[in-house]
């Protein structure tokens, strides 16, 4: 839940996207988001965001977000919505539905609301 105060400063970015690009050794039993393609998918999202002129959205690499078994993962703030994604099509759907239109891609959400 996002809690704001009346005297909080305005948001610097409308949305802030953190994509796990953590890389562990190949033999690590937890694996890593980078091994599952998160670096290239992050670059795709970042390039698309720039092409579309979404200057109020920030795309960042993140270290381990501690949801390794679900990876690759991203979290979007201020809402705190988590997504697991594997393809460029997934990234494009998140971009259009969440970052542009303000909706949710329920099929990719890690913590789905009840009934979705």
Image (cartoon, rainbow, N blue to C red):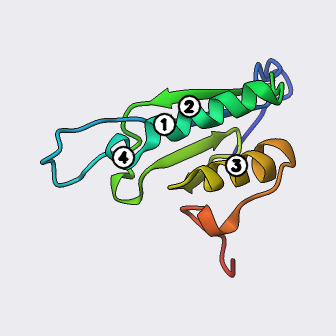
State which quadrant residue 14 falls in: top right
Rounded to the nearest whole Å, what is the CA distance between mark 4 and mark 1? 20 Å
- Report the Cα–Cα distance between label 1 and label 2: 5 Å
**Few, some or many C-alpha atoms within 10 Å of disc 2 (few <14, some 14-19, many ≥20)?**
some
In-image side of 28 versus 20 (left or right): left
Crowdedness near tag 1: few (<14), some (14–19) or many (≥20) residues, C-alpha within 10 Å = some
Kindly state the secondary structure of the residue where label 3 is placed. helix
Q: Is residue 20 visible?
A: no
Place residue 11 in its image quadrant.
Answer: top right
Give me the disc on residue 43. Answer: 2
- Circles 1 and 2, Cβ within 8 Å, touching? The answer is yes
Q: Earlier in the sequence, mark 4 or mark 2?
A: 2
44, above or below 89, in the image: above
Q: Name the disc covering residue 92, or none.
A: 3
Q: Earlier in the sequence, mark 2 or mark 3?
A: 2
Earlier sequence position, callout 4 versus callout 1: 1
Query: Which residue is farthest bottom?
Result: 115
Quick one: label 3 or label 4, which is nearer the N terminus?
4
Give the left or right position of residue 94, taking residue 111 as reference.
Answer: right
- Measured Cα–Cα span from mark 4 to mark 2: 21 Å
Question: Pointer 1: what residue?
Answer: 40
Task: Identify the residue shown where x is 75% and y is 58%.
Answer: 104
Q: 70 or 50: nearer the eye?
A: 50
What residue is rendered at 73% in x and 45% in y? Answer: 95
Image location (x, y in percent) of residue 41: 53, 41
For the residues carrying marks 3 and 4, which lies nearer the camera in this image? Answer: 3
User: Mark 1 or 3 closer to N-term?
Assistant: 1
Q: Position of residue 52 (x, y in %)?
A: 82, 30
Measure the C-alpha gap from mark 3 to mark 4. 24 Å
Q: Identify the residue under disc 4.
A: 66
């Amino acid at each position: 839940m996002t809690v704001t105060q009346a005297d909080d400063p305005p948001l610097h970015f409308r949305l802030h996207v953190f994509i796990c690009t953590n890389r562990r050794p190949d033999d690590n039993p937890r694996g890593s988001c980078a091994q599952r393609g998160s670096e290239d998918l992050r670059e795709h999202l970042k390039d698309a965001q720039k092409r579309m002129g979404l200057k109020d959205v920030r795309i960042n690499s993140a270290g381990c977000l501690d949801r390794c078994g679900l990876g690759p993962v991203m979290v979007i703030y201020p809402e705190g919505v988590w997504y697991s994604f594997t393809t460029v099509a997934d990234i494009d759907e998140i971009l259009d539905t969440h970052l542009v239109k303000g909706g949710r891609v329920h099929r990719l959400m890690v913590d789905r609301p009840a009934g979705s």
